[in-house]
Amino acid sequence: MKLDAEFDPLAEALHALRMTGVFYCRSEFTAPWGVTLPPVTDCLWFHVVTAGRCVLEVEGAEPRTLLPGDLVLVPHGRGHVLRGTPGAAVPAIEGIAHNYVSDRYAILQYGGGGAETVLVCGAVRFDHPTARYLVDLLPKIIHVEPAGAPQAEWMQSTLRLIAAEAATLRPGGEAVITRLSDILVVQGVRSWLENDPSARTGWLGALRDSQIGRALTMVHREPEREWTVASLASELAMSRSAFAARFTDLVGEPAMQYVTRWRMLVALDVLRTEGASVAALAGRLGYQSEAAFSRAFKRIVGVSPGSVKRVSPALATW
């Protein structure tokens, strides 16, 4: 397989960040106010401040003051607190009345009648299981202040559009806000990847490596190939021993263990989304028998492939 010289393995990882919006909300708070947002399994929370200011508190991280134009991500579905003034009570947001515009978009108005803070908030779930490799590496908070970001003007324009739509929800406004919010989430992750030194280590660092990044790309693109350490090393014009050592050092696990894990991630996604038979999927991923595939799947995922087809994607986690 020939790889495009311009291909960016990191871009392909970002492509895996397909999202499903679980919940979006335009929040209009007046001082004094505070709310507690619940943990949401396998989801990423985001908040965009369009007016006013507030403080975000996530356990284990320094509180962050958020100003108009700021975007903040809470990547691991962790519960957290937003408050407009120090010491304000923080009731559970589920107990506050919402005006539901649709089944996943609401308008929330809450507070004591003082200074106003307006946010667009939401929780999104990543559809593709391979996104876990990336999302698991994200910090507890990603705080993007557009004025200081390389993509400042682009983000400011997007935020202005969201603010305008949120101010007076017109026909189609919900769709505009949710789609722009999803774009901002990906942009927020990109900002972290470009600016945080910790994004240059581990699996992400391996993707950036000129040799191991190519090996990962080959496995990602053709998981069904009968890969071996020798064949991967040959593709990169490396010795078998040098490739094996470098792969393990950068990725954190041996090459063939990674190949198997990646195949099972692909299988998990197909089982959840396409409804393929186990036998067909085994052949599609290069296994000579359904039994061999099923054993590998259960070893990596923890359940049989047949059981994944019978439960909802939210329950088939590992």
Image (spheres, grey):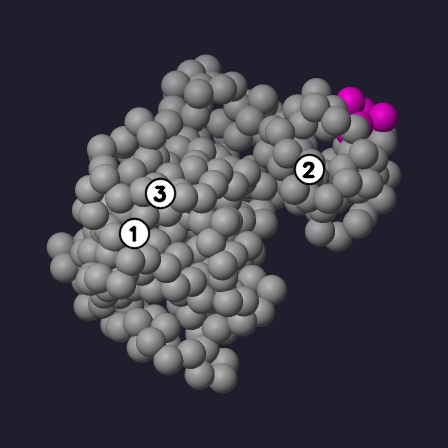
Q: For residue 102, which quarter of the picture?
A: bottom right
Residue type (three-letter) at the residue carrying disc 2: Leu
Residue type (three-letter) at the residue carrying disc 1: Trp
At 27% across and 63% down in the image, what residue appears?
113
Q: Is residue 211 visible?
A: no
Magenta: main secondary structure equals helix
Q: Which residue lies most toward the left here?
A: 148
Residue type (three-letter) at the residue carrying disc 3: Val
Q: Is residue 250 visible?
A: yes
Q: Position of residue 103 (x, y in %)?
A: 60, 64
Q: Is residue 294 magenta?
A: yes
Q: Position of residue 68 (x, y in %)?
A: 20, 61
How far, Cα to Cα, is label 3 from label 1? 7 Å
Disc with the residue nearer the chain's start (3 vs 1): 1
Q: Which residue is mark 2?
A: 315
Q: Which residue is mark 1?
A: 33
Looking at the image, residue 54 sits to the left or right of residue 290; the answer is left
Disc with the residue nearer the chain's start (1 vs 2): 1
Q: Which residue is mark 3?
A: 90
Badge 3 crowding class, 10 Å Cα cut-off, few under 14, some 14 to 19, many 20 or more, is some
- Asked whether 231 or 78 is in front, the reply is 78
Q: Is residue 257 magenta?
A: no
Find out whether the residues at labels 1 and 2 contact each other: C-beta distance under 8 Å. no
At 49% across and 27% down in the image, what residue appears?
233
Looking at the image, residue 37 sits to the left or right of residue 72; the answer is right
Q: Could you tell me which secondary element the residue under label 3 belongs to? A: loop
Q: Could you tell me which secondary element the residue under label 1 belongs to? A: loop
What residue range appears in magenta? 291-296
Q: Position of residue 39 (x, y in %)?
A: 48, 38
In the displayed structure, would residue 172 be above or below residue 120? Answer: below
Disc with the residue nearer the chain's start (2 vs 3): 3
Q: Could you tell me which secondary element the residue under label 2 belongs to? A: loop
